[in-house]
Image: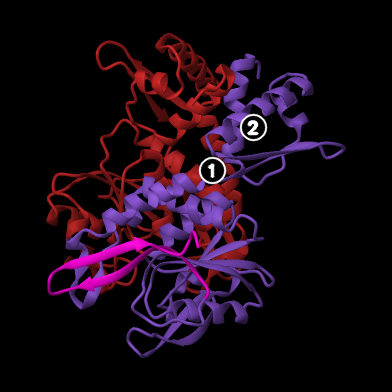
Chain colours: A red, B purple
Amino acid sequence: MKIRRSERMVVISNYLLNHPYKLTSLSYFAEQYNSAKSSISEDIAIIKRAFEKTSVGEIETLAGASDGVIFRPTMDQAEARQVLEELKELLAQSDRILPGGYIYLSDLLSTPRILKNVGRIIANHFRHEQIDVVMTVATKGVPLANAVANVLDVPFVIVRRDLKITEGSTVSINYVSASSDRVEKMFLSKRSLKPGSRVLIVDDFLKGGGTITGMTSLLAEFDCHLAGVAVFAENNQENRNDLIYKSLLKVSQIDTKSNHLVVDVGNIFD
Amino acid sequence: MKIRRSERMVVISNYLLNHPYKLTSLSYFAEQYNSAKSSISEDIAIIKRAFEKTSVGEIETLAGASDGVIFRPTMDQAEARQVLEELKELLAQSDRILPGGYIYLSDLLSTPRILKNVGRIIANHFRHEQIDVVMTVATKGVPLANAVANVLDVPFVIVRRDLKITEGSTVSINYVSASSDRVEKMFLSKRSLKPGSRVLIVDDFLKGGGTITGMTSLLAEFDCHLAGVAVFAENNQENRNDLIYKSLLKVSQIDTKSNHLVVDVGNIFD
């Protein structure tokens, strides 16, 4: 394809955005756009500065035989804080309180712009960890896992609370739901997770921690390792001393009588 | 922010990619990057050519009082065909056949690169329709709905087969599952869908069509309109004369004895 230099820069930056964490050789771009490798190098230096100034991400260039370029999405703390401040306001709307002290979240976790930012914040926090797979539990965790997996460019797996024929053979475990104090089951398709994978667990709402503990037990059944836990929101009224996790938002008070909800930013920046 | 012209082009193209279907005034960019509107205009002309040559999308520029720019993602048919040919091969792997003639799809629908391309193909097909919301049914439809909604930049809603307290008050309907011939229920949170919305229904696998028909009935309950139906794969052995839909892939033969699967491209290009 023959394109002008100024156009080439747009096209290469778009390519990098769509191929995070992938090493692409300069020769690939040189062939693709019929240009000298030195020109491609200059283009990438400009894209690198632009991405850094607007905190889109970091570009690493490797010299030598395996010369190439890798793009890693980032998000600076100021932008992340602003996103969470806005989400805090949205979550604190009093009409979200449901009977039993539950909170309606579905609208937030089904809006692409919110999901993209939430995915960027979580992925950015764990970007120095080796993560092979994102895991969540059906149903509301799915868009969240999807959003994080998009940024990390890794697959995600969905743990289910019911047994579905379309999952093939499954591994199941029992866990104690801290909220209901009952023994529950969860299932994961046997072929969905390779042994030895490093797994980031994400979920929409953390109450007692039973679901997260259940997923952690599943990891052991699959000979996989826990790389981290991140939740969209947590309820800080419960006791979960032994659980290490990052939360984006924290619901510190739910008053069902006065319909009042107090929400803070979670422990993600601690 | 003060950045060089070449960097500005990278930054503006990234902005447009992240704000599809949104009208942004040239003044916004001019202020943001401390540049003349005429320079921004030239930048956008270059980005427009680059996006068109690589079929990333169309850029429309509006002149006059409401001067501005709108980016609409597209996908050309050659690229879409290539994506579907590759997916066809993946889906035809014999180890996907499950007892009962079901097919294991979960790995495909949880890989970000596949989902992004599938989302682009479906969104591109319906890009001349007015679509306000994407609807799907839990669980495997969720990543698909998410992918399509990302490209169209609209929210998605998740119909459930079970009743969850975290959804608040719900509307439920009964429908007949064509595969099992039983009457089943589906639920949708009352506040998740505004009356008058135009809805694109997506699902992972189309067999008898009962689930799609059920979701269509739900639309009527919410005074919403059907804008279209798209499925990732369909099984063409069933009879669904009255259903209008687009499929990406078509499983034309499942032989559970010889473990043989025949997959074709669906009716999306018809």
Query: Tag count in the figure?
Result: 2
User: Amino acid type of disc 1?
Assistant: Leu
Q: Is B21 placed left or right of A247 in the picture?
A: right
Q: Chain of mark 2?
A: B
CA–CA distance in space, label 1 to label 2: 33 Å
Q: Position of residue A261 (x, y in %)?
A: 57, 59
Q: Position of residue A102 (x, y in %)?
A: 47, 67
Q: Toward which corner of the image does residue A40 lie, by quadrant?
A: top left
Residue at image coords 58%, 19%: A6
The magenta segment: B244-270
Magenta span includes B259: yes
Using the image, determine if residue B203 lies above or below residue A240: below
Q: Nearer the viewer, residue B229 or B140?
A: B229
Furthest-front residue in this view: B270
- Residues marked 1 and 2, same chain: no
Using the image, determine if residue A232 lies above or below residue B190: above
Furthest-right residue in this view: B65
Q: Can you see residue A121?
A: yes
Q: Which residue is mark 2?
A: B48
Q: Which residue is mark 1?
A: A84
Q: Is B1 placed left or right of B116 in the picture?
A: right
Mark 1 neighbour density, 10 Å: few (under 14) some (14–19) many (20 or more): many
Q: Label for residue A43?
A: none
Q: Toward which corner of the image does residue B189 lie, by quadrant?
A: bottom right
**Disc 2 element:** helix
Q: Toward which corner of the image does residue A74 lie, by quadrant?
A: top left
